[in-house]
Amino acid sequence: MRPSLRDARPEEIEALRAIERASSQRFIGVMDDLAADEPTSAEALVARIDAEGLLVATDADVPIAFVMFRPVEDGLYIEQIDVLPDFAGQRLGARLLDAVSDKARVRGLKVLTLSTFRDIPWNAPWYRRLGFVDIAEADLTPGLSAIRQAHVARGLDESARTFMRRPV
């Protein structure tokens, strides 16, 4: 059976945190600090569910992947996307991104944006294959610049990251 997509539910918070934790393990040996980082807080996930900004892919109605997003300027900003390793390579991430694109279109928004690691194969190169293009530093909007500043404040190395966009 093909996994289905739907809005996340509050009772799935710990399952979503487990997906994020399992997905981050692919960073071991590449970015060990990131692999060891705590997943998104339950409070943040509840806030995204309440704002209709969290979709899941499910197998037998059990979450196996998710995408978290929020409005930023004229689009939806992808905050996080994770897939359980056992389900990697099934285009779940691409399907989730297309579903977010559909939500943006219904809301009258024009783009999807995100920030990701420039050189990690399952980050920026993967998004490029899905139609995202890099945004030059000089072309960052005020909203994306604020996200960059929030990343810096959290201690992220923004020199290794790029912002990207794709029309909906």
Image (cartoon, rainbow, N blue to C red):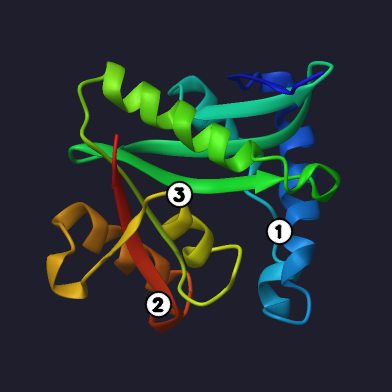
Q: Distance between the Cα atoms at labels 2 and 1?
A: 19 Å
Residue 85: where, in percent of width, then height? 81, 50
Q: Distance between the Cα atoms at labels 3 and 1?
A: 28 Å
Which residue is at the front of the view, 105 or 140?
A: 105
User: Which numbered disc flags the more N-terminal residue, 3 or 1?
Assistant: 1
Residue located beneath label 3 in the image: 130
Callout in the foreground (2, 1): 2
The secondary structure type at the circle numbered 2 is helix
Pointer 3 local density, CA inside 10 Å: few below 14, some 14–19, many at least 20:
some
In this rendering, the answer to whether 160 lies above or below 132 is below
The secondary structure type at the circle numbered 1 is loop
Pointer 2 local density, CA inside 10 Å: few below 14, some 14–19, many at least 20:
some
In this rendering, the answer to whether 92 lies above or below 61 is below
- Residue at figure coordinates x 21%, y 34% from the top left: 110
User: Looking at the picture, which amino acid does disc 3 mark?
Assistant: Leu
Name the mark on residue 38: 1
- Residue at figure coordinates x 20%, y 22% from the top left: 108
Residue located beneath label 2 in the image: 158
Name the mark on residue 57: none
